[in-house]
Image: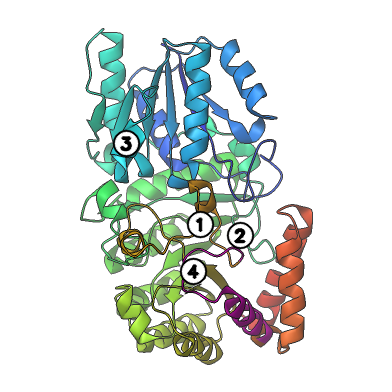
Amino acid sequence: MRISFVFCPLYGEGGFDTFGKTHWTSQIYPGLCSISAYAKSKGYNNIELIDLRKLRGWDHFKEEIKKRNIDVAGLTMMSCDFNNVNKAVSIIKEVNKNTIVVVGGVHPTVATKEVAVNKDIDHIIVGEGEISFVNLLDDIQNNKKSERIIFGIKPNLNALPFEDCELFDYQTTVKFVTNFPGIFKPPSVTMIASRGCPYNCTFCAPHAKTMFGPRVRYRTVGNVIEELKILREKYHFNSLFFWDYSVTLNKDWMLEFAEEYEKNSFKANISANSRADSICYNEKAIERLSEVGLRMLHIGYESGSQRILDFIKKGITIEQSIKATEICKKNHILVRGLFMLGLPTETKEDIQKTLDLIKKIKPDIYSFSYFTPVPGSYLWDYCKKRNLNLMKSYDELADYGPSKPKIKGVDYEYLKGVVEEAFGLKFKSRLIGKIMRFIYTKAKRGKTRYLLIWLYSKWVAFTSKR
């Protein structure tokens, strides 16, 4: 049986003929890697990937499909992939109507009926795909009929084989640092130690619960360390980034990981996503991780207004945001602050409180996004009910940056000035902040923007003295 996975991330800075040019366009997709590894462990070894980032265009994709006699095509779909995945499916069926097309991922999980409208899609997997995809392959091989909509079976994460990273061109991927090349050094690898998120932030939730279930499931520390040993042997990595929703959630896991990481002589600097409350609750574990290589935490502060934090059900307080930053700085951990502007009901007073928080905590790096309603989230429903959404296509979901209007009732010109003022705080001059933001937003995601980020992160590392 010949199986081809098709990867269609033609959004944002990505697109055809972009793989290998920047870290943004060279990342792997862990879900496909995990499904590929599990399928191969069950004897389905004739698996390949068609990565549209390596192709010249849709005609080139059609040529590649014609070259292959594909029995099963598997595609993953986020909401921003919706149109491109549907186009890829139509081309696959045009070339060979007998190819069985299977689509899974976040969007088919949260918007199953919408995806099912496309009759060229033979099967839709809702939720986690490893076991269910292989069960489907077994049915196809044995000429058994399967349901069109298949509900995923949650795997034991420790029983899964390690991700098949080499499904992608991983030798190229690791040459790029996941972010901030002036701080972290290549080769760089990524890791996922858990699945799920227990929080209810309305701009995102209940995505993770719908996809992975209500509880966070962890791999054992030993399981993660064994995979890191293999990655070290193959790629000699200098940087490690955890892609988990919040790796700082579980104190006992962090403490055990720090011990094993040190015992096995890993030297790579670590970066991870985090939350203010989990840092406050787990201060000792954060301190211990800093001793073995934790270099940066990406913290979702979102807002300096407690009213807004409560509105989005973030589950943190302003006091925790302040304390979490203090804990990081005390332990020589760089802080990347993530802030969201343009939320429904947000006022200029709320936004001023966000600027006041930035002035107080002084993150080493801060990034702004404009609130973007995402299908399947509570705020998507909120905006839909009130007819607030300004986006005309799922393609526009890929741009979270402060560039295009997202919802009605928001003064985006005012927000543009707020972002310039915030960057001006970093450079101690609003004019310099305005110039830097202009250059950054106009630069394409290539060498110019990479150079800007390298210089900026070098400056951050130097001025932070951490």
Nearest the eye: 419 or 44: 419
Residue 48 image position (x, y, % from top left): 51, 22
Residue hosting label 4: 298
Q: Distance between the residues labelled 1 and 3?
A: 21 Å
Q: Distance between the residues labelled 1 and 2?
A: 9 Å
Residue hosting label 1: 241
The figure's colour scheme reads rainbow
* Quarter in which the N terminus is drawn: top left
Q: Is residue 358 left or right of residue 113?
A: right
Q: Distance between the residues labelled 4 and 1?
A: 11 Å
Residue hosting label 3: 160
Asked if one can make out residue 399 in the rendered structure from this viewpoint, the answer is: yes
* Quarter in which the C terminus is drawn: bottom right
Mark 2 surroundings within 10 Å by alpha-carbon count, few (fewer than 14), some (14 through 19), many (20 or more): some
359 is higher (above) or lower (below) than 335: below
294 is higher (above) or lower (below) than 148: below
Taking the spot 54% from the left edge, 46% from the top edge, the residue there is: 232
Q: Earlier in the sequence, mark 4 or mark 1?
A: 1
Residue 268: quadrant of the picture: bottom right
Disc nearest the viewer among 1 and 2? 2
Nearest the eye: 152 or 117: 117
Q: Which of marks 4 and 3 is nearer the N terminus?
A: 3
Q: What element carries label 4?
A: strand
Q: How far apart are marks 4 and 3 (CA)?
A: 28 Å
Q: Which of marks 1 and 2 is nearer the N terminus?
A: 2
